[in-house]
Image (cartoon, grey):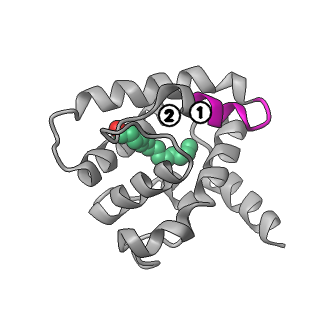
Amino acid sequence: DVVVMKDVTLGFGQALDKCRQESDLTEEKMEEFFHFWRDDFKFEHRELGCAIQCMSHFFNLLTDSSRMHHGNTEEFILSFPNGEVLARQMVELIHTCEKQFDHEQDHCWRILHVAECFKSACVAHGIAPSMEMMMTEFIMESE
Ligand code: M21
């Protein structure tokens, strides 16, 4: 469900400011986290992978080996309205992507590849929110 995905993205994005410094993700590389869903968004900066690792860590969504913690991730998604429609599916999609890049030793690069794979999977499954939807909500939240 695209509305739930929008809410989860904005919730997760709350941690971006806490992670910018330690991951070296400047505003030039990513202004706001919801740009993740832009059609033309490029997954090219290792710093974004580091930032997603830091943000995931902030919400306690990672294991000791920096893989997704399935239980905590499901709980995190369930904490959003109607989260139950997405929780299992999201965990599945991310895990399927994780398996594809398990050989990558560098956590930041691996997580960046997993994130790109996850976005493509969401587009393919029709659960990727539109940019219009993301921006409208983002502006409403900041007013
Ligand atoms: C829906 C909200 C945000 C999406 C963000 C990034 C998702 C990327 C998943 C990376 C998971 C990291 C696990 C690494 O093995």
Quadrant where the image shows the N terminus: top right
Farthest front residue?
64
Dot 2 falls on a residue whose secondary structure is helix
Identity of the amino acid at label 1? Ile
Give the left or right position of residue 62, taking residue 114 as reference.
right
Res 127 label: 1
Identity of the amino acid at label 2? Cys
What stretch of residues is rendered in magenta? 74-82
Res 122 label: 2
Question: In the image, what residue occupies the spot 64% across and 30% down?
Answer: 75
Q: Within 8 Å: ligand 1 and the Cβ of disc 2?
A: yes
Along the viewing direction, whichever of 134 and 46 lies nearer the viewer: 46
* Quadrant containing ligand 1: top left
Position of residue 7 measured from the top left corner of the image (x, y, whole percent): 70, 46
Position of residue 79 measured from the top left corner of the image (x, y, whole percent): 73, 36
Counting the numbered discs, the total is 2
